[in-house]
Image (spheres, rainbow, N blue to C red):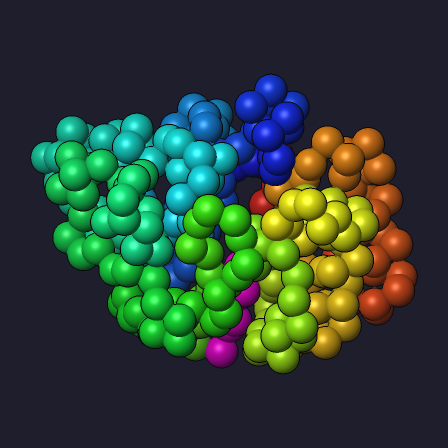
Amino acid sequence: MGTAGGRTVVFRQLRYSGGLWLYIKGKNILVDPGPGSLIRIFEFKKDPRDLKGIILTHRHLDHVADVASVVESATESNTKKLDFLLAPYDAIDGEDPIVLKYTKKGFKHIWTTQLNQEYNYEGISIKALIKHIHQGAETYSLGIFYNNKKVVLVPCGRFYENMLHTYPENSDVMIFNTTFVKPNQHFYHLSAEDVEKIIMKAKPKKAVLTHYSLQMLKENPEKVAKLMSEKTGIEVIAAKDGLKVEF
């Protein structure tokens, strides 16, 4: 639903910021409905009423700004409920929660993300794998498992060594918020060089880059992904708005 990352790209809408729509075992789950998510859902010919759950990786506006609108549409003004919301504590019940009390009424279950806690939904298991270093927001990488399939979401956060020893190996797909090309210690985001290290260690069958800053767009994400593929021997895809990936 979008590949924007960083203030300029998101809030000038140089790329869309509608989040990620997962279709797993016949269930539709929306991850990080940022600005414009409701519009993008319809633009890409989806229907909010088909959603079963929403996942928020963290509370920053580029990931959650449209959550209330999406829930209102999906529940038809609270005449029905979504099955679940999974989000960190500070997004739900912290000092400045992003999920409104009104919005909470739209869910049958609200789960607070906790490290190593496993959440089960109709045969789909969701687990918080590692806590990120991300300024001003509680953030976790998430593993989504069903049957023998493994999907790993690696959201925003600064790279640190534990990331090389946490993720399950041979995932079917790993999706990385890859904001920069080279590490930038002034920002709490991953770079392509950081992601390359993780890929070399975790060896997913497929890796997808998204959440681009202006710097990444100038460098050309497709070119960056191609170089990463050549160096790692892993298929690395630079996401585009509206991209569909099968796994």
The chief SS type of the magenta part is strand
Q: Is residue 123 above or below residue 82?
A: below
Q: Position of residue 193 (x, y in %)?
A: 79, 58
Residue at screen point 46% across, 47% down = 136
Q: Position of residue 98 (x, y in %)?
A: 31, 39
- Picture quadrant where residue 235 is located: bottom right
Q: Is residue 190 above or below residue 172?
A: above
176, 245: nearer the viewer: 176
Magenta highlight on residue 166: no
Instruction: Report the span colored magenta.
Output: 148-153
Residue at screen point 15% across, 53% down = 108
Quarter of the image where the C terminus is located = bottom right
Query: In this view of the protein, can residue 182 be seen by the observer?
Result: yes
Q: Is residue 66 above or below residue 164?
A: above
Q: Position of residue 206 (x, y in %)?
A: 68, 63
Q: Position of residue 106 (x, y in %)?
A: 17, 41
Q: Is residue 168 left or right of residue 104?
A: right
Residue at screen point 27% across, 44% down = 95
Residue at screen point 53% across, 61% down = 132
Q: Is residue 162 left or right of residue 128?
A: right
